Amino acid sequence: MFGRIRKIWRKKTVERTEERSTVTPRTERRGHNLFEAAAAYVSACAEDDQDQIDEAAAWVSPEALSFGVNELACRAVIALARERDESPRTVARTLLGLPAA
C-alpha cells in the first residue's frame, strides 16, 4: 500500500517539476504586486486609458487594488505637503477643489 502511495506521490512531483520548467521565468510567473497594480491603475486613470485601467484592475483583487490606491494617495499627499510646506489636509482639499477648512 505504501509503495502505491509513494509511486503516485513521485509521479505528481515529477509532473509539477515538468510544469515549472515549461512555464515562463519566475519573474513573469510571480504576478503583479498590489502597489504595481495601483500605480498602473492610477496613472491609466490620469491618462484616461480604459484598456490599461481594465488590465491593471485584473492584476489583483478589488480589495487589494483599493488598498494600493489608498496607500498611493496617502503617499502622494504627504509628498506634496512636504514639497509645498503645507499640511496634508490643506493639500488634499486643494487637490479636490474644496475650500480651505
Image: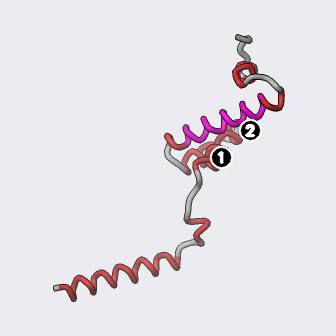
Q: Secondary structure at mark 2?
A: helix
Q: Residue type at mark 1?
A: Gln
Assign the magenta stretch its main secondary structure. helix
Q: Secondary structure at mark 1?
A: helix
Residue at numbered disc 1: 52
| Residue 26 against residue 12 in the figure, above or below | above
Residue at horizontal 34%, vertical 79%? 12
* Residue 37 locus on image (x, y percent): 61, 48
Residue at horizontal 40%, vertical 80%? 15
Dot label at residue 47 = 2
Q: Is residue 79 magenta?
A: yes
Q: Quadrant of the N terminus?
A: bottom left
Q: Quadrant of the C terminus?
A: top right
Callouts 1 and 2 close, C-beta under 8 Å: yes
Count of numbered circles in the view:
2
Q: How is the rendered protein coloured?
A: secondary structure
Quarter of the rendering containing residue 79: top right
* Residue 23 locus on image (x, y percent): 53, 73
Camera-nearest residue between 65 and 55: 65
Q: Is residue 44 magenta?
A: no
Residue at horizontal 28%, vertical 82%? 8
Counting residues from the N terminus, which is met first, the one under dot 1 or under dot 2? 2
Dot label at residue 80 = none
Q: CA distance from mark 1 to mark 2?
A: 9 Å
| Residue 52 against residue 88 in the figure, above or below | below
* Residue 63 locus on image (x, y percent): 49, 40
Q: What segment is highlighted magenta in the picture?
A: 65-81
Q: Residue type at mark 2?
A: Glu
Circle 1 residues within 10 Å: few <14, some 14–19, many ≥20: some
Circle 2 residues within 10 Å: few <14, some 14–19, many ≥20: few
Extreme residue in the bottom direction: 3
